[in-house]
């Protein structure tokens, strides 16, 4: 499937750290918080903002479960990137996503192929913000590349989920607000940091959504219905 550029999208970088591959990240990670944060992000954004991410076996099923309960066309609102290098390990849920973008294998190399996939994600879409949840080394790599290629977009590392995002919170060149490490009400947290009004209606497809944020509110829609 050819890539279709999305505007003002939200990028999700998340994973549940593997205790064998990344024991240090797994030790600090809160898997319950990771699940809650991913679920909350999908709830806040779906039908309001496009959501883009690079598929992960533990995260893709979470996104799909929440998406199917929202009554919107997630094939239009959600855009999933995966490298062909991992095709044999794709989760079964990948088949349910209509907006799947497969990227090429580079020299049979894992790191080069992932870097290629990430660069395509960040160059092909215009992002409003990026959210980082839990994760291993790839979260740090995506954070650095995202800041380079999308310098005007906000970065939101949910420090309370632990894992690799704690390394982002420790960076001296970036200042993050205290609530990212202390507020576990992730729905409210994302509404604040992503500037998504709680009164915004959900729309079945991005094409149906008014360009003006004020026209997306319940009060405006009710008044003009």
Image: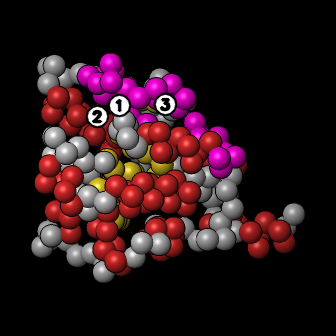
182 or 148: which is nearer to us?
182
- Numbered marks: total: 3
The secondary element bearing badge 3 is classed as helix
87 or 32: which is nearer to us?
32
Nearest-to-viewer mark from 3 and 1: 3
Nearest-to-viewer mark from 2 and 3: 3
Position of residue 73 measured from the top left corner of the image (x, y, whole percent): 64, 40
Position of residue 45 measured from the top left corner of the image (x, y, whole percent): 54, 57
Identify the residue shown where x is 68% and y is 52%: 203
Please give the residue where the numbered disc 1 appears in the rendered image: 82
Asked whether the beta carbons under mark 1 and mark 2 sit within 8 Å of each other, the answer is yes
Looking at the image, residue 136 lies above or below residue 131? above
Left or right position of 224 against 37: right
Q: Quadrant of residue 25?
A: bottom left
Position of residue 196 measured from the top left corner of the image (x, y, whole percent): 54, 68
Please give the residue where the numbered disc 2 appears in the rendered image: 117
Image quadrant occupied by the C terminus: bottom right
Q: Which residues are magenta?
A: 69-97
Looking at the image, residue 162 lies above or below residue 108? below
Identify the residue shown where x is 20% and y is 64%: 166
Report if residue 68 lies within the magenta region: no
Please give the residue where the numbered disc 3 appears in the rendered image: 93
**Alpha-carbon span between mark 2 and mark 3:** 19 Å
| Classed neighbour count for the residue bearing mark 3: other residues with Cα under 10 Å, few (<14), some (14–19), many (≥20) | some
Q: Residue furthest right?
A: 225
Identify the residue shown where x is 53% and y is 32%: 97
Label for residue 41? none
């Amino acid at each position: 499937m050819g890539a279709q550029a999305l505007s003002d999208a939200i990028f999700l970088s998340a994973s549940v750290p593997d205790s064998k591959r990344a024991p240090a990240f797994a030790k600090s990670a809160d898997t319950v918080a990771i699940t809650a944060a991913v679920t909350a992000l999908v709830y806040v954004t779906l039908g309001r903002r496009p959501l883009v991410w690079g598929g992960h076996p533990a995260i893709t099923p979470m996104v799909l479960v929440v998406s199917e309960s929202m009554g919107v066309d997630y094939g239009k609102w959600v855009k999933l990137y995966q490298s062909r290098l991992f095709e044999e390990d794709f989760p079964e849920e990948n088949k349910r996503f209509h907006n799947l973008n497969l990227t090429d294998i580079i020299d049979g190399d894992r790191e080069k192929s992932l870097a290629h996939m990430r660069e395509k994600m960040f160059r092909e879409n215009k992002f409003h913000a990026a959210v980082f949840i839990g994760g291993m080394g790839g979260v740090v790599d995506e954070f650095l590349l995202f800041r380079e290629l999308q310098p005007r977009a906000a970065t939101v590392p949910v420090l309370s989920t632990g894992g690799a995002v704690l390394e982002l919170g420790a960076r001296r060149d970036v200042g993050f607000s205290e609530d990212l490490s202390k507020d576990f009400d992730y729905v409210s947290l994302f509404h604040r940091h992503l500037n998504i009004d709680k009164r915004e209606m959900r729309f079945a497809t991005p094409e149906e959504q008014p360009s003006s944020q004020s026209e997306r509110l319940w009060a405006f829609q009710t008044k003009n219905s």
